[in-house]
Image (spheres, rainbow, N blue to C red):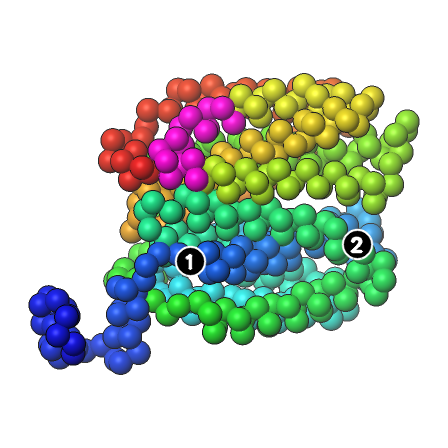
Amino acid sequence: MTADTDPATQRFLSQPSALPPADIEESTRAHRAPGLSASLTLLFSVTCALAVANVYFAQPLLDSMAQSLGVASSMIGVVVTATQIGYALGLLFIVPLGDLINRKRLILSQVLLSAIALAAVGAAQQWIALLSAMIVMGLLAVVVQVLVAYAAALATPSQRGQAVGTVTSGIVLGILLARFTSGVIADIAGWRTVYFLSSGLMLILALVLWRVVPVTASPRHQAPYRALIRSLFKLFITERTLRARGLLGLMIFAAFSVLWTSMVLPLSAPPLSLSHTAIGMFALAGIAGALAARRAGCWADQGHGQRVTGISLVLLTLSWLPIMFAETSLVALVCGVVVLDFAVQAIHVTNQSIIFAARPDAQSRMVGAYMCFYSVGSALGAAAATQVYALWGWTAVSLLGALISASTLILWFLTRHLLTAHQVASLR
């Protein structure tokens, strides 16, 4: 014990402890943690990118999967549904564990098990085996949300928004990575190779995380798991900020899904008749979303979360005007997509920064609850977009997206005062 140790620390260290040495070391490191370093933030972003890519790999591979397994093309879309079912279950039953057990161990377990699930997807020879592996893969992909909550917990209050924004930008880039790489790899070596390679990458990533991520004390939440899950559902009732921001998240991702689900239909149809490769190039617009995620986090740290939300919702609504001309002007479509992606990701990061500030003691459960709104919005937007396009065409789809966006702007205006003075102060 050194002479410059403060008296309170001396008394603490001199007392006998029931904690094992490893836990004492964990507590000490947690106490000394200076915040979230730039290198660790980058590692979290890369992990999120690779993990979320696993969810989106299947989209351009569905036809190859159907031919390989002898499944009707009308049924192969269930693969995406199975993955989303697993992801939703993970949000409800795995993400809250971040408030109960050591987060580093939870993250490592998910990454290692994801490697096994990915290998099972690649090796699946039967339809049921593929669906089962996809459900498990989606279940474990929620490591993304555990990492977002962990980043928020490690960061100091002044850097929380920036940390969440940077990690979220990794998620956006991961979606781009999936769209670009899975098709290329499948063309060269088959769709199974995509999952085998991803499995190997997850194993390498697990080793890096084990060596680099700091050991921190386990959360002090003493409730059993069943009570923890009950408390997650109670958050929907007790937290007004969660409900308000979650509803905003549901609606912006419904609008987001309306665009990205149906955009391929007019682009691949005459007179444009673009190839799948050319259509995939539009995913580059997602880079704007990645940039927005990081900047929005910084703005939230400076106390501008509500202003960012309002401006972004105006941009989101206006973005549908150039998008409406997709069938006649690809330049207009690109401009609209860039603005829409920027606006959605800015709101998404701001939402998370605000709900984390509302309940710092329940960050894993809060992000799990919030992402449930996201899943519902994405599903509803996708279902509505395909039906509207089949009935009335692209103009009607654009009007639907604009209507959802404008309704979200009105909702925000009516609920913008729900932040308490304490929550606003914590965002500053």
Q: Is residue 254 left or right of residue 4?
A: right
Q: Which residue is mark 1?
A: 37
Quadrant of residue 282 within the rendered picture: top right
- Kind of element beneath mark 1: loop
Image vertical order of residue 426 relative to residue 88, above or below: above
Please identify the quadrant where the C terminus is shown: top left
| Residue at 57% from the left image edge and 58% from the top image edge | 46
Please identify the quadrant where the N terminus is shown: bottom left
| Residue at 25% from the left image edge and 75% from the top image edge | 24
Q: Position of residue 231 (x, y in %)?
A: 32, 50
Image vertical order of residue 47 relative to residue 411, above or below: below
> Residue 364 lies in magenta, yes or no?
no
Instruction: State which region is magenta.
Output: 298-312
Q: Position of residue 144 (x, y in %)?
A: 51, 55
Q: Which residue is mark 2?
A: 183
Q: Position of residue 243 (x, y in %)?
A: 39, 35
Can residue 335 be seen here?
yes
Which label is found at residue 365?
none
> Residue 304 lies in magenta, yes or no?
yes
Count of numbered labels shown in the rendering: 2
| Residue at 67% from the left image edge and 48% from the top image edge | 176
Pointer 1 or 2: first along the chain: 1
**Furthest residue in direction front, as rendered:** 3
Quadrant of residue 300 within the rendered picture: top left
Specify the amino acid type for callout 1.
Ser
Specify the amino acid type for callout 2.
Gly
